[in-house]
Image (spheres, grey):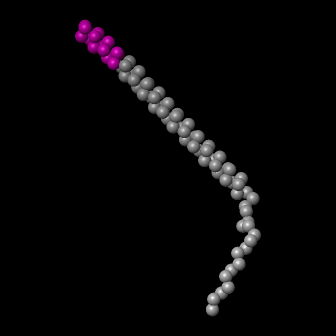
Amino acid sequence: MAQPARQRSTAPPPLDPNAIRRAYRLERAKRRHRDEQARARRMAGLRFATVLLLLLVLSVLLSLTIWEEVERLFGL
């Protein structure tokens, strides 16, 4: 035998009073993480450029030192 259809409740579903606060906190955490990641990428690029420049300067100094020694040894 068929059952009668259930009646829908007209009352709104219960709302969590802290849901909005949690959602804002989650979005702020996401934004903070995104900003920290962007800052970390910028700093990594700056570190890379600094190390590259330092290696370039050291290689030029080493080349000049070797050139001077070759000139001194062979009387060029």
Task: Name the residue: 48% across, 33% down.
Answer: 45
Q: Is residue 68 magenta?
A: yes
Q: Is residue 21 magenta?
A: no
- Quadrant location, the C terminus: top left
Q: Residue drawn at (71%, 53%), measured in percent from left and top?
A: 21
Identify the residue at image location x=70%, y=75%.
8
**How many numbered discs, if any?**
0
**Location of residue 70 (image quadrant):** top left
Vertical placement of residue 74 versus 1, above or below: above
x, y percentage for residue 49? 45, 29
Q: Residue visible at 34% across and 15% down?
A: 64
Q: Is residue 57 left or right of residue 8?
A: left
Camera-nearest residue between 34 and 73: 34
Q: Nearer the viewer, residue 59 or 72?
A: 59
Q: Is 37 drawn above or below residue 26 in the view shown? A: above
**Residue 46, position in %: x, y?**
50, 30
Q: Which residues are magenta?
A: 63-76
- Left of 53 or right of it: where is 18? right
The spot of residue 55 in percent (x, y) is 41, 25
Quadrant in the rendering for residue 75: top left
Secondary structure mostly taken by the magenta-highlighted segment of the chain: helix
The picture places residue 62, in percent across and down from the top left corner, at 36, 19
Q: Residue furthest bottom?
A: 1
Q: Is 4 or 32 nearer to us in this picture? A: 4
Nearer to us in this view, 50 or 3: 3
Query: Image quadrant for the N terminus?
Result: bottom right
21 versus 11 height, above or below? above
